[in-house]
Amino acid sequence: MKSVRYNLYLSLAFLIYSVNIMAQNSELPQLGKASVNEVIAAMILEEKAGIVVGAGLKIDPAVANMLDEDMKRMIPDPGSLAAKTNSPVPPAAGTTVEIPRLGIPCIVVNDGPAGLRMMGGNYQCTAFPIGSLLASTWNCDLIYQAGQAYGNETLEYGVDVLLAPGLNIQRDPLCGRNFEYFSEDPFLSGKIASAMVRGIQSQGVGTSVKHFVVNNQETDRKTVNSVVSERALREIYLEGFRIAIQEAQPWTVMSSYNLVNGLYTSENPDLLIKILRDDWGYKGLVTSDWISGNDFVAQVKAGNDLLMPGPYQVNSIIQAVNDGQLDEKILDRNVENILNLVLKSPRFKKYQYSSKPNTDENTKKSRIAATEGMVLLKNTGNTLPLSENIPNIALFGNSSYQTHIGGSGSGSVATSYKINIVDGLEKAGYIPNKVLQEAYVSFIKENEPRPTNMLDAMMGRKPQAPEMLIDVSLAKKLADETDIAIITIGRKSGETSDREIENDFNLSKTEKTNIELITETFHSKGKKVIVLLNIGGVIETASWKNIPDAILLTWQPGIEAGNAIADLISGKVNPSGKLAVTFPNSYSDVPSAKNFPGEIVTNDSVITRQVVYEEGIYVGYRYYNTFDINTSYPFGFGLSYTNFTYNNLKLSSGKFKDEITVSVTITNTGKIAGKEIVQLYLSAPKKELDKPSQELKEFAKTRSLNPGESQTVEFTIDAKSLSSFNSERSAWIADAGKYTVNIGASGEDIVLTKAFKLSDDILVARVSKALEPQININELKGK
């Protein structure tokens, strides 16, 4: 009886306690019902410090002992806010902390730039084409639709913010993450990124444009100091971000690992406050890259709102407030940005995640995007498309059978299937030689190294087998038995390491030997040879491109790779992609070749490497065109199975006032339907500032034009299009003088030109004095 009474008292006491807690919570402001400021006022310091830091990783103790020190720091202390927060989507990259007493849920963020990357679990994710391919479509409407598909999978799998798109400039072809990025040109990069952001966010989830800014190499990426002039920063490395941020308003921006002009980007108020917020008017959240920066308090002060993945920074932030080193009002500012993000999230809105995205529709969009971004580089004698009487194919190259659908690292996507090139060709009705196929499959199996560890395997860093050397007898046998040879050259790179010149940018000896032998042997039988470039970044082509009959740049085309490639080879789709990056004759021709990846620094406690951007604004085609450097394939180049003519270029006026309208008519003069990419470059007068010979200012992709059909394309040029950045005046200025509109099919194929005059200088925009380099830069000057 005493036991029953005791239990009754205990239950009553617990009930009273629960009622009191509920009463207390009911009196507390709740996010979404009270104002954000009221919620912040109700937070204690530990909660404020906790919410500006991610929730870390929940790892089994047995596994934790095997981790390095960086990884161990991400395990939360027992009883902390981070420890009490359980990620609703465990395979995701990160989670913010939840504070239930104030109605604040956690939100989930996850990679990445080529599709949702879920590490483990039963997720059917679509690997979309890489950034280099998407930019090669030059089709913002198509990119918006691909973004909708990205966003659909992000939403339905319970992720609130997709850590994409990657928006860094492809400054040097050896950067290991170039496949994630769009172009060497900031205008094209910004427009493609803007379309992607708008597409993803149309589904009610957020994006994180990254890596802000000048993250152009992986070598010593966390400790490299990028020394860049103010003008080069504004015109080349910041401009794409500005376009995407002002046009699409991404929910978040991710600061990069590197230092710029001596200071980590995540600790740099010039970058995150003066430029991002004051100059550009950005209202969203800034998140750090994972385990970045050196001074947590400096990150908070600089406006890096969220430090990921946490939670090891919390105690330092609390201590700084208590010691007076960090004003709590600054912390409140960052908390406000986080809470505003939470309010927009699907999780806060209690969206019912289905775990069933529209996979079939998304893979269709991936395939369409892949076909529009592949670039036909060569097509002698109408080798492509293949006629119906060429069914038997000798399919050479490891990547024909183990096709690279994307790169590695956080930009990789784990998929339930992929269509290899051999599979796509078979589905299209072609007959790859089975003896050759079996030889390749056996060779790859016997020579492919195993991943060095589990993490490398999960991140797609799978070592590749060397290319199989083809002997003369096999080449002759196949030339007799098949109708055509297709040789696939494959490359894969990714996060944490940059590429090499030999056996990567340059073809290996085996690859060159194979191309020469196979082409000579098949040509001796009157048969043709096609090369497919299944690559993520630029390679050397000048030394061997004259050997085969056709070259198709397939990039890394995503989950439907083989099917998309077969669509172009068969003629089901007419190629319409054009290069968003220049293919130089040799690596020594690259303007950054002399200073990539920089010099090792031994006398600094933070910086281990420094790279001085001596090429200044002369990146990519700006350099090759201005200095008359021959290229293998120029920026904007791409062939079609049909032909187009450009006519009737008109300007709305010969004198500039506010804006000028440009129109040009494109006609399909060939025999099949196709799309053309029209490029508008502008040549500006030189006064105080050095200027490139021309710069891309507008572009448009026509609809599919039938033979004989025409379309008139219109562009608008405003004062910003005319301007260059004057560092001395901290302003964008359009110089008075003669401007030439250059309309072309590529940067080196200008078809029509017309000029107009600007009577007086225009001060287009004055901006903050920011990010001044601390050392003298001997910058390249134009001719």
Image (cartoon, grey):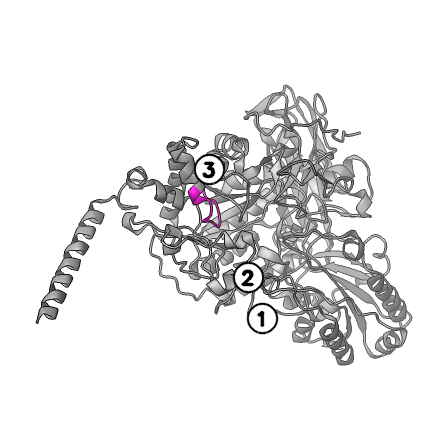
- Is any atom of residue 548 visible in this view? no
Task: Residue 293: name its quadrant.
Answer: top right
**Residue 256 image point, x, y percent:** 57, 43
Q: Nearer the viewer, mark 3 or mark 1?
A: 3
Disc marking residue 300: 3
Pointer 2 local density, CA inside 10 Å: few below 14, some 14–19, many at least 20: few
* Circle 3 SS class: helix
Residue most toward the front? 2
Q: Quadrant of residue 472?
A: bottom right
Residues under numbered marks 2 and 1 in contact, where contact means CB atoms less than 8 Å apart: no
- Disc 3 + disc 1, Cβ < 8 Å: no
- The image's mark for residue 417 is 1
- Picture layout, residue 465 above or below residue 38: below
State which tag comes first along the sequence, 2 or 1.
2
Do we see residue 380 in this rendering?
yes
Specify start and end residues of the magenta stretch as a single range: 305-315
Q: Name the residue beneath numbered marker 2.
A: 66
**What whole-number distance in Å separates the C-alpha atoms at marks 2 and 3?**
31 Å
Q: Is residue 564 left or right of residue 444?
A: left
> 653 above or below 126?
above
Residue type beneath disc 3 = Val
Label 1 sits on a secondary structure element that is loop
**Residue 670 versus residue 753: which sits nearer the camera?**
753
Task: Report whether 599 appears left or right of 520.
Answer: left
Helix, strand or loop for the magenta stretch, by majority: loop
Magenta segment includes 308: yes
Q: For the residues carrying marks 2 and 1, which lies nearer the camera in this image?
A: 2
N-terminal of the pair, mark 3 or mark 1, is 3
Please name the residue shown 41% across and 58% down the image: 87
Label 3 to label 1, Cα distance in Å?
42 Å
Q: Are marks 2 and 3 in contact (CB under 8 Å)?
A: no
